[in-house]
Amino acid sequence: MSLSQATQEEPSSEYRYHLLRAATERFQSGLAGLDAAQLRQVEQQAQQTFALESLVLSTSEARDTLIPERRLDEAVAEIRDRYLDTADFTAELNANGLEETTLRNALRRELVFDAVMQRIGSRAEPVTETDERLFYELHHERFIAPERRGARQILITINEEYAENGREAARARIDQIAETLKKRPQDFGKLAQAHSECPTAMQQGQLGTLPRGQLYPELDATLFALEPGQISEVVESEIGLHLLLCETAEPATTVTFDQARTRIHAILAARQSKDCQKRWLAALQQQAPPRTEVSTA
């Protein structure tokens, strides 16, 4: 596959890197493995990211940014480590019109871009306590931890293709387990391990600690009606017959502002940093000349 600009000039290695990065991100493939429709999508993404990177690298902020050689070594090594060996790595670069030297140059540009954008983001207005409290009040539902139940289950599936799992046989089996549990409720885990046909049998039927809505509706309603230590009657779902043990009950709780404040601050700081970057980029783009399109031929 040959690459060329609309002017028939050979595209830069930096642009080739954007093509390869887009192909990897979107399709987990090199350029040679793409069909025509996929290649068009990759080209569109690469043109956008390359143009944006070039715009940022034309600024005084970028000219003042130096990337240590050690950081470049690490960036190259991170990519090389995705391949079986150096030969495989080199072959993939060559197949996409790159070599290690040109990859290094492309990575330098990428690291400068990231450093500049981080610096621009740091110019954002600081987050105030008023901002934090307003966010907490406007998104109060995000700080409510729902009621949860710690549970175990025993499942006997219904499958008419197997004699032991026909409806009558399955019911008889789980009724017998239920009778045993009435005498020895403390053996629920052992009986789950011995008889349950759910993968959780390996963990003695343990389902974990669950909020509402994680189980089949019939099981959900039954579990949240149980008290800690209580075992359900036999419950039927679309996959079979169940016995549930409620081990713990955690009531719904509200995370206080003080408990949530660190997380809120991080959310708002990231948002304001991103908004600051967007405004800076928008101002650059207004001043920028039209870009040259790059395509495959």
Image: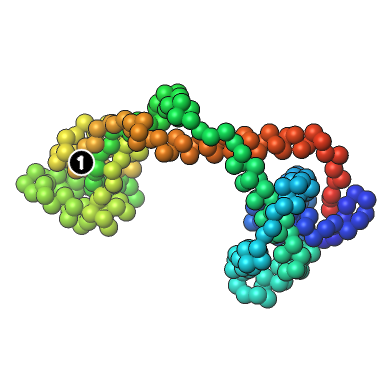
Q: Is residue 141 left or right of residue 155?
A: right
Residue 177 x, y percent position in the rendering? 15, 48
Placement of 165 over or under 142, stated as above or below: below
Placement of 70 over or under 256, stated as above or below: below
Residue found 32% across the figure and 54% down from its top: 199
Residue found 35% across the figure and 38% down from its top: 214
- Choose between 89 and 216: the one closer to the eye: 89
Q: Can you tell which quarter of the image residue 31 is in?
A: bottom right
- Residue 53 visible in the snapshot: no
Image quadrant occupied by the N terminus: bottom right
Q: Residues within 10 Å of mark 1 (few under 14, many from 20)?
A: some
Q: Is residue 183 left or right of residue 295?
A: left
Residue 34 x, y percent position in the rendering? 73, 55
Residue type of the residue flagged with mark 1: Thr
Q: How many marks?
A: 1
Q: What is the basis of the colouring in this image?
A: rainbow
Of all residues, the one furthest to the left in this rendering is 183
The residue indicated by pointer 1 is 248
Residue 32 x, y percent position in the rendering? 75, 61
Image quadrant occupied by the C terminus: bottom right
Residue found 26% across the figure and 50% down from its top: 206
Residue found 84% across the figure and 50% down from its top: 295
